[in-house]
Image (cartoon, rainbow, N blue to C red):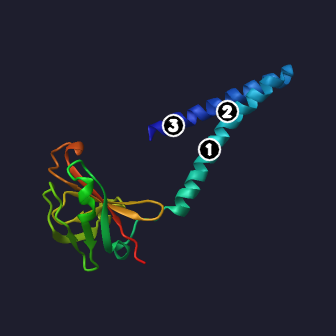
Amino acid sequence: MESIYYYIIFLVICLIVGIAVLAHSIIEKHKKGIKIGLLITSFPFLIIGAFFLYLFIDSKYTKPYPNEKELVGVYHLVGASNDVEEADYKKCRLILKSDGKFTLSTIPYINNCIEGSYYIDREVGYPNTFSMECIVESYIYTNWDNFQVRLIFGDNDLEYEERSFLVFEKIPTK
Protein backbone atom coordinates (compact mmCIF):
# COMPACT_ATOMS: atom_id res chain seq x y z
CA MET A 1 0.00 0.00 0.00
CA GLU A 2 2.91 2.33 0.65
CA SER A 3 4.05 2.14 -2.97
CA ILE A 4 0.86 3.81 -4.17
CA TYR A 5 1.86 6.91 -2.22
CA TYR A 6 5.09 7.08 -4.21
CA TYR A 7 3.10 6.94 -7.45
CA ILE A 8 0.79 9.70 -6.27
CA ILE A 9 3.75 11.86 -5.20
CA PHE A 10 5.40 11.24 -8.58
CA LEU A 11 2.23 12.28 -10.45
CA VAL A 12 1.82 15.41 -8.33
CA ILE A 13 5.47 16.37 -8.93
CA CYS A 14 4.99 15.83 -12.68
CA LEU A 15 1.91 18.04 -12.60
CA ILE A 16 3.69 20.81 -10.66
CA VAL A 17 6.79 20.69 -12.87
CA GLY A 18 4.64 20.66 -16.01
CA ILE A 19 2.62 23.66 -14.86
CA ALA A 20 5.82 25.51 -13.91
CA VAL A 21 7.45 24.81 -17.30
CA LEU A 22 4.23 25.75 -19.08
CA ALA A 23 3.82 29.01 -17.13
CA HIS A 24 7.48 29.97 -17.65
CA SER A 25 7.26 29.20 -21.36
CA ILE A 26 4.06 31.23 -21.79
CA ILE A 27 5.63 34.21 -20.02
CA GLU A 28 8.83 33.92 -22.09
CA LYS A 29 6.82 33.13 -25.28
CA HIS A 30 8.92 30.03 -25.89
CA LYS A 31 6.89 27.71 -28.20
CA LYS A 32 9.02 24.59 -27.68
CA GLY A 33 8.79 25.07 -23.90
CA ILE A 34 5.00 25.32 -24.13
CA LYS A 35 4.86 21.95 -25.90
CA ILE A 36 7.16 20.37 -23.32
CA GLY A 37 5.10 21.89 -20.47
CA LEU A 38 1.86 20.56 -21.96
CA LEU A 39 3.42 17.14 -22.41
CA ILE A 40 4.66 16.97 -18.80
CA THR A 41 1.35 18.34 -17.47
CA SER A 42 -0.72 15.84 -19.46
CA PHE A 43 1.29 12.80 -18.25
CA PRO A 44 -0.47 12.47 -14.85
CA PHE A 45 -3.88 12.80 -16.52
CA LEU A 46 -3.01 10.06 -19.01
CA ILE A 47 -1.88 7.73 -16.21
CA ILE A 48 -5.01 8.41 -14.14
CA GLY A 49 -7.21 7.95 -17.23
CA ALA A 50 -5.52 4.65 -18.04
CA PHE A 51 -6.03 3.49 -14.45
CA PHE A 52 -9.77 4.27 -14.56
CA LEU A 53 -10.06 2.61 -17.96
CA TYR A 54 -8.42 -0.51 -16.50
CA LEU A 55 -10.86 -0.48 -13.56
CA PHE A 56 -13.81 -0.13 -15.95
CA ILE A 57 -12.66 -2.98 -18.19
CA ASP A 58 -11.77 -5.17 -15.22
CA SER A 59 -15.18 -4.70 -13.58
CA LYS A 60 -17.11 -5.23 -16.83
CA TYR A 61 -15.29 -8.25 -18.22
CA THR A 62 -13.81 -10.16 -15.30
CA LYS A 63 -16.08 -12.75 -13.85
CA PRO A 64 -16.84 -12.38 -10.15
CA TYR A 65 -15.86 -15.20 -7.82
CA PRO A 66 -18.25 -18.09 -8.40
CA ASN A 67 -20.78 -19.37 -5.92
CA GLU A 68 -21.11 -23.06 -5.09
CA LYS A 69 -23.54 -23.71 -7.95
CA GLU A 70 -21.26 -22.13 -10.59
CA LEU A 71 -18.29 -24.08 -9.28
CA VAL A 72 -19.84 -27.47 -10.09
CA GLY A 73 -18.45 -29.09 -13.23
CA VAL A 74 -15.54 -30.79 -14.91
CA TYR A 75 -12.11 -29.12 -14.96
CA HIS A 76 -9.07 -29.93 -17.08
CA LEU A 77 -5.44 -29.36 -16.16
CA VAL A 78 -3.93 -26.25 -17.78
CA GLY A 79 -0.80 -25.76 -15.65
CA ALA A 80 1.32 -27.56 -13.11
CA SER A 81 4.62 -27.53 -11.30
CA ASN A 82 7.61 -29.27 -12.82
CA ASP A 83 6.49 -32.57 -11.29
CA VAL A 84 3.84 -33.11 -13.97
CA GLU A 85 4.74 -33.43 -17.63
CA GLU A 86 2.58 -31.72 -20.25
CA ALA A 87 1.86 -35.09 -21.85
CA ASP A 88 -0.06 -36.03 -18.68
CA TYR A 89 -2.26 -32.90 -18.73
CA LYS A 90 -4.99 -34.52 -20.84
CA LYS A 91 -5.34 -37.39 -18.36
CA CYS A 92 -5.86 -35.13 -15.35
CA ARG A 93 -9.40 -34.11 -14.45
CA LEU A 94 -11.04 -32.52 -11.45
CA ILE A 95 -14.78 -33.07 -11.04
CA LEU A 96 -16.67 -30.92 -8.53
CA LYS A 97 -20.12 -32.32 -7.77
CA SER A 98 -23.19 -30.46 -6.54
CA ASP A 99 -23.28 -32.47 -3.30
CA GLY A 100 -19.95 -30.95 -2.16
CA LYS A 101 -17.81 -33.93 -3.18
CA PHE A 102 -14.92 -33.95 -5.63
CA THR A 103 -13.08 -36.54 -7.69
CA LEU A 104 -9.49 -35.94 -8.77
CA SER A 105 -7.55 -38.04 -11.25
CA THR A 106 -4.45 -39.81 -10.00
CA ILE A 107 -1.64 -37.47 -10.95
CA PRO A 108 1.83 -38.86 -11.65
CA TYR A 109 4.55 -37.83 -9.17
CA ILE A 110 2.10 -36.08 -6.84
CA ASN A 111 0.74 -37.83 -3.79
CA ASN A 112 -2.87 -36.71 -4.01
CA CYS A 113 -6.15 -38.03 -2.74
CA ILE A 114 -8.70 -39.14 -5.31
CA GLU A 115 -11.96 -38.24 -3.56
CA GLY A 116 -13.11 -35.94 -0.82
CA SER A 117 -15.33 -32.98 0.01
CA TYR A 118 -14.98 -29.29 -0.82
CA TYR A 119 -16.55 -25.94 0.03
CA ILE A 120 -15.96 -22.24 -0.52
CA ASP A 121 -14.54 -20.92 2.73
CA ARG A 122 -15.86 -17.34 2.98
CA GLU A 123 -15.11 -17.25 6.72
CA VAL A 124 -11.39 -16.76 6.06
CA GLY A 125 -12.06 -13.30 4.66
CA TYR A 126 -10.76 -13.91 1.14
CA PRO A 127 -13.38 -14.51 -1.56
CA ASN A 128 -11.17 -16.99 -3.37
CA THR A 129 -10.42 -19.39 -0.50
CA PHE A 130 -11.54 -22.83 -1.44
CA SER A 131 -11.22 -25.71 1.02
CA MET A 132 -10.77 -29.27 -0.13
CA GLU A 133 -10.42 -32.27 2.13
CA CYS A 134 -6.87 -33.76 2.05
CA ILE A 135 -5.39 -30.94 -0.06
CA VAL A 136 -3.10 -28.43 1.65
CA GLU A 137 -4.25 -25.22 -0.07
CA SER A 138 -6.70 -24.43 -2.84
CA TYR A 139 -7.84 -21.16 -4.40
CA ILE A 140 -10.26 -19.91 -7.03
CA TYR A 141 -9.00 -17.39 -9.58
CA THR A 142 -11.10 -15.59 -12.16
CA ASN A 143 -10.24 -14.22 -15.57
CA TRP A 144 -12.24 -12.63 -18.36
CA ASP A 145 -14.14 -15.67 -19.49
CA ASN A 146 -13.67 -18.47 -16.99
CA PHE A 147 -12.26 -19.34 -13.61
CA GLN A 148 -9.54 -21.63 -12.38
CA VAL A 149 -9.02 -23.80 -9.33
CA ARG A 150 -5.43 -23.93 -8.08
CA LEU A 151 -4.42 -26.79 -5.82
CA ILE A 152 -1.20 -26.80 -3.82
CA PHE A 153 0.25 -30.01 -2.42
CA GLY A 154 3.09 -30.66 -0.03
CA ASP A 155 4.11 -29.85 3.48
CA ASN A 156 3.28 -26.36 4.78
CA ASP A 157 6.81 -26.18 6.19
CA LEU A 158 8.27 -26.23 2.67
CA GLU A 159 8.95 -23.05 0.74
CA TYR A 160 6.25 -22.18 -1.79
CA GLU A 161 8.57 -22.97 -4.73
CA GLU A 162 9.26 -26.46 -3.37
CA ARG A 163 5.61 -27.46 -3.23
CA SER A 164 3.68 -29.04 -6.08
CA PHE A 165 0.74 -27.21 -7.62
CA LEU A 166 -1.94 -27.86 -10.21
CA VAL A 167 -4.08 -25.36 -12.10
CA PHE A 168 -7.43 -26.56 -13.40
CA GLU A 169 -9.77 -24.61 -15.66
CA LYS A 170 -13.46 -25.35 -15.97
CA ILE A 171 -14.54 -26.96 -19.20
CA PRO A 172 -17.40 -24.76 -20.49
CA THR A 173 -20.74 -26.51 -20.80
CA LYS A 174 -22.45 -26.14 -24.16
Q: Quadrant of the C terminus?
A: bottom left
Mark 1 Cα within 10 Å, few/some/many (few <14, many 20+)?
A: few
Q: How far, Cα to Cα, is label 3 from label 2?
A: 15 Å
Q: Residue 8's image quarter?
A: top right
On screen, residue 27 above or below 113: above
| Pointer 3 with pointer 1, Cβ within 8 A | no
Q: Which amino acid, by three-letter code, is at mark 3?
A: Tyr
Query: Counting residues from the N terminus, which is met first, the one under dot 1 or under dot 2?
Result: 2
* Residue at 54% from the left image edge and 36% from the top image edge: 7
Q: Pointer 3: what residue?
A: 5
- Of residue 71 and residue 105, the one placed in the foreground of this image is 105
Mark 2 Cα within 10 Å, few/some/many (few <14, many 20+)?
A: many
Query: What is the secondary structure assignment of the residue under circle 3?
Result: helix
Q: Pointer 2: what residue?
A: 15
Mark 3 Cα within 10 Å, few/some/many (few <14, many 20+)?
A: few
Q: Which amino acid, by three-letter code, is at mark 2?
A: Leu
Residue 89: x %, y % from top left: 27, 60
Residue 46 visible within the image: yes
Residue 25: x %, y % from top left: 81, 23
Which residue is most to the bottom?
A: 99
Query: What is the secondary structure assignment of the residue under circle 2?
Result: helix
| Pointer 3 with pointer 2, Cβ within 8 A | no
* Residue at 20% from the left image edge and 48% from the top image edge: 163
The tag on residue 48 is 1
Residue 45: x %, y % from top left: 67, 41
